[in-house]
Image (cartoon, helix red, strand yellow):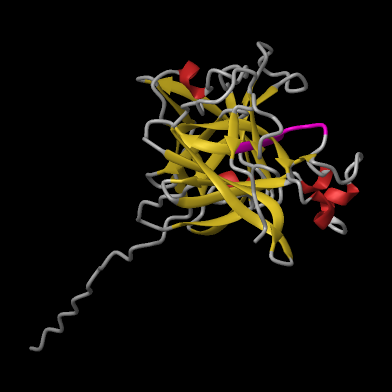
């Protein structure tokens, strides 16, 4: 007698999960540390996030001094985040019309876009069975850098947007040689003492950050105010390179005249009115910074 024995192997197929958990974690010492000293925004109550065209209001909670969002579910794959805002409910839970924006990620093309690693929108990937780290930055008037970890965790650390203002005078006996330049377009025309047309380049730890100039108003009537990001919790060395527009031979161009340095939020040791006044030449002897006369040789 022949006995037929059929053995069926049952191997469980590993299926890709339909969704993965996604959460946002705000890594701060206390809620009040979420905003810097010059930012009057209140503490956040919830997050407003747009992913793949869908806007979600996500609750947040405090755990051991850290702020976390409730868990979201996202399918494995590539997703696009186009809005990330932390908001305060203005003590009216359930009523959104009076809610206050606390922190937000700037859009590409906005003034503060160059202060973040990735302005919105941008893509990120959620991997099946693997943790995903996504990096996103948010800014208030005082700002925060966001670092992500976990399946799609977003952690928030604070940075500060700082500001320095400059105003300058350009004194030269050869002012008539500047005919046809921007100085000739100033309200008082060419003269011995003219408002300086200049730019300031900002460097952090020897890396270029941003550049500002006052050409659009010809240096007249208002200082040039320079904003730059200072990451809290790290030592940042800043350099501010002052270039003034002068004749170099027959070329009208920016020439480096001075470099200021500071560490983190340290103030430049010039003046008490919030504006650093400088002069090239001897026509404003009480300026905060007096630089030697310039000769176009």
* Residue 118 on the magenta span: no
Camera-side residue of 43 and 185? 185
Camera-side residue of 100 and 220? 220
Left or right of residue 250, residue 116 in this image: left
Camera-side residue of 154 and 275? 275
Residue 239, given in percent of the width and then of the height, sits at 48, 43
Look at 69% across and 12% down and name the residue there.
92
For the N terminus, give its image quadrant. bottom left
Look at 58% across and 21% down and name the residue there.
45
Residue 22, given in percent of the width and then of the height, sits at 47, 43
Left or right of residue 63, residue 194 in this image: right
Residue 155, given in percent of the width and then of the height, sits at 44, 37
Residue 94, given in percent of the width and then of the height, sits at 69, 19
Camera-side residue of 214 and 120? 214
Residue found at the very far bottom of the displayed protein: 1
The boundaries of the magenta stretch are 221-227
């Amino acid at each position: 007698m022949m006995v037929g024995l059929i053995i069926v192997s049952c191997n469980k197929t590993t299926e890709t999960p339909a969704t993965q958990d996604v959460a946002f974690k705000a890594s701060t010492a206390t809620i009040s540390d979420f905003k810097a000293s010059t930012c009057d925004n209140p503490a956040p109550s919830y997050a407003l996030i747009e992913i793949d065209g869908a806007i979600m209001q996500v609750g947040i909670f405090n755990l051991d001094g850290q702020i976390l969002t409730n868990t979201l579910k996202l399918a494995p794959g590539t997703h696009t985040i186009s809005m990330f805002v932390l908001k305060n409910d203005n003590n009216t839970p359930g009523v959104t019309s009076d809610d206050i924006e606390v922190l937000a990620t700037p859009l590409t093309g906005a003034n503060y876009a160059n202060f973040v690693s990735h302005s919105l929108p941008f893509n990120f990937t959620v991997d099946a069975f693997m943790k995903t780290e996504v990096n996103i930055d948010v800014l208030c008037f005082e700002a925060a850098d966001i670092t992500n970890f976990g399946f799609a965790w977003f952690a928030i650390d604070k940075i500060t947007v700082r500001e320095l203002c400059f105003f300058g005078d350009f004194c030269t006996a050869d002012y008539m040689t500047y005919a046809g330049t921007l100085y000739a377009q100033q309200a008082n025309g060419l003269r011995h003492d003219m408002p300086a047309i200049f730019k300031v380049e900002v460097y952090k730890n020897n890396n270029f950050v941003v550049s500002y100039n006052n050409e659009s108003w010809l240096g007249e009537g208002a200082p040039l105010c320079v904003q730059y990001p200072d990451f809290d919790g790290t030592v940042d060395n800043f350099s501010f390179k002052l270039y003034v527009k002068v004749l170099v031979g027959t070329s009208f161009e920016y020439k480096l005249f001075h470099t200021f340095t500071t560490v983190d939020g340290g103030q430049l040791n010039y003046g008490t009115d919030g504006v650093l006044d400088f002069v090239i030449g001897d026509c404003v002897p009480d300026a905060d910074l007096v630089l030697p006369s310039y000769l176009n040789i």
